[in-house]
């Protein structure tokens, strides 16, 4: 299903609506009708013909197949004490080496508890499964297996072949026909043994997320919603992540985030479905127990064709467009500043500047200025009162010192 969460503000532009397609497009149609618009799209049943779709299914012996297929390979897993939420910045998780067979063992254990209804992991069973000989030999994931997530484990990586850890799974997946002409940067496995949620982030590449088994819910925001998502500092190691924890947002620190869900769209992906997530689109992913997915990343045509000697020009064009857009919102910004954020000192400085200006311009220009200035407010008298009240409060504070 696809649902638009906008209800209070104006409905999201028609051009940004996520579409769901029953048939996979040709490579030409994908590039001209979908990829070029930079808007997500869902492809129902897109990967049901993969070998992985039947062979990796945990309900059909898939865990045994994967264990036999991959063998003793050691993969890099994400370990997070904040699980079931997995944050992208390095302070919130660590990357740990993990035998793939050990992770499959955790998944089998999870399935047994789900089937018998216990829903808990018993220490004795963990020891029987992973066989630590003493407390000093125990791995950090053994006491809390739900804190482990196989995130972005490379099956194919054309940019760094040394990072590939699961090449043996390559023949079980197929590149969708509409991506056959793309130069793929990497193909990765994503697998969780318990419910998991990714922190809100965007990718610097186009992304096709394919569900092999299980179910994922993805909430998406267009790049134009960046301001209300408070991206982390651009030079930080997690610059593509939002600072807002959506499971418990602090609106006193992130006031613009109060309208986040009004700009979002939600998609539910079942086994066999695929979701195209264009570069720059923020997304948060919720995964059910034992969900297995594969994703493909590739560079967009825009980025691939962006010549370095044109960067300064493109930057000027983008800054001009952003400035023009923000100027349309200036009256509401000014209104919020005067009515809600203007301090007594600010009111005193503002009125002093007004008085200084009054002495330097003609009466006609002065009248025109105040007409334009106060005309920006829905309630001109409320703005005047806010400024004068602030000025009087400043005088009162000064008089008592």
Image (cartoon, helix red, strand yellow):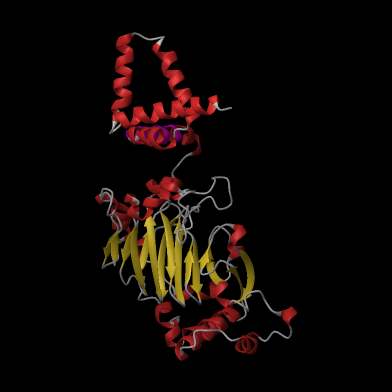
| Any part of residue 25 in sight | no
Residue at screen point 29% across, 64% down: 2
Residue at screen point 28% across, 27% down: 375
Which quadrant of the structure image shows residue 313? top left
Going by the picture, which residue comes out furthest to the front?
400
Q: Is 159 placed left or right of 287 in the picture?
A: right
Residue at screen point 38% across, 67% down: 217
Q: Where residue 223 sits: x, y (%)? A: 40, 48
Q: Is residue 324 magenta?
A: yes
Q: Is residue 84 magenta?
A: no
Question: 104 or 236, which is in the foreground?
Answer: 236
Q: Where residue 177 sits: x, y (%)? A: 35, 65
Q: Where residue 140 sits: x, y (%)? A: 66, 74
Q: Is 109 placed left or right of 266 in the picture?
A: right
Question: 168 or 103, which is in the foreground?
Answer: 103
The quarter of the rendered structure image containing the C terminus is: top right
| Any part of residue 369 in sight | yes
Instruction: Classify 198 as above or below 279.
Output: below
The quarter of the rendered structure image containing the N terminus is: bottom left
Q: What kind of secondary structure does the magenta stretch mostly adopt?
A: helix
Instruction: Classify 348 as above or below 216.
Output: above
Question: 378 or 210, which is in the foreground?
Answer: 378
Magenta stretch in the rendered image: 315-328
Q: Is 136 placed left or right of 203 in the picture?
A: right
Q: Where residue 299 sits: x, y (%)? A: 45, 53
Instruction: Classify 47 as above or below 397.
Output: below
Counting the numbered discs, the total is: 0
């Amino acid at each position: 299903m696809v649902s638009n969460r906008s209800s209070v503000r104006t409905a999201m532009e028609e051009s940004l609506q996520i579409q769901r397609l029953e048939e996979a497009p040709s490579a030409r149609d994908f590039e001209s009708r979908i990829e070029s618009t930079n808007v997500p799209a869902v492809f129902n049943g897109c990967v049901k013909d993969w070998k992985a779709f039947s062979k990796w299914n945990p309900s059909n012996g898939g865990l045994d197949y994967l264990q036999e297929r991959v063998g003793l390979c050691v993969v890099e897993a994400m370990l997070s004490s904040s699980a079931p939420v997995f944050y992208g910045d390095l302070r919130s998780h660590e990357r740990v080496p993990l035998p793939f067979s050990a992770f499959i063992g955790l998944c089998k254990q999870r399935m047994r508890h789900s089937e018998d209804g216990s829903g808990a992991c018993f220490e004795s069973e963990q020891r029987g499964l992973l066989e630590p000989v003493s407390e000093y030999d125990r791995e950090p994931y053994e006491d809390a297996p739900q804190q482990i997530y196989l995130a972005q484990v490379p099956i194919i990586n054309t940019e760094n072949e040394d990072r590939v850890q699961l090449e043996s799974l390559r023949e079980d997946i197929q590149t969708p026909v509409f991506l056959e002409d793309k130069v793929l940067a990497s193909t990765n496995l994503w697998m969780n043994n318990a419910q998991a949620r990714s922190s809100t982030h965007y990718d610097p590449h186009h992304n096709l997320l394919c569900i092999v088994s299980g179910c994922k819910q993805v909430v998406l925001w267009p790049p134009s919603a960046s301001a209300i998502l408070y991206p982390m500092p651009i030079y930080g190691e997690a610059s593509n992540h939002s600072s807002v924890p959506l499971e418990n947002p602090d609106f006193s620190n992130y006031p613009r985030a109060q309208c986040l869900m009004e700009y979002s769209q939600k998609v539910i992906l079942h086994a066999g479905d695929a979701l195209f997530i264009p570069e720059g689109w923020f997304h948060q992913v919720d995964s059910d127990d034992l969900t297995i997915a594969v994703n493909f990343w590739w560079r967009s045509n825009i980025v691939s064709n962006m010549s370095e000697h044109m960067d300064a020009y493109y930057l000027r064009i983008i800054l001009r467009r952003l400035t023009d857009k923000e100027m349309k919102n200036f009256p509401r910004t000014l209104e919020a500043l005067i009515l809600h954020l203007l301090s007594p000192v600010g009111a005193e400085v503002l009125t002093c500047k007004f008085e200084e200006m009054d002495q330097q311009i003609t009466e006609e220009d002065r009248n025109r200025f105040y007409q334009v200035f106060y005309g920006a407010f829905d309630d001109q008298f409320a703005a005047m009162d806010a400024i004068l009240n602030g000025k009087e409060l400043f005088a009162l504070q000064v008089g008592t010192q």
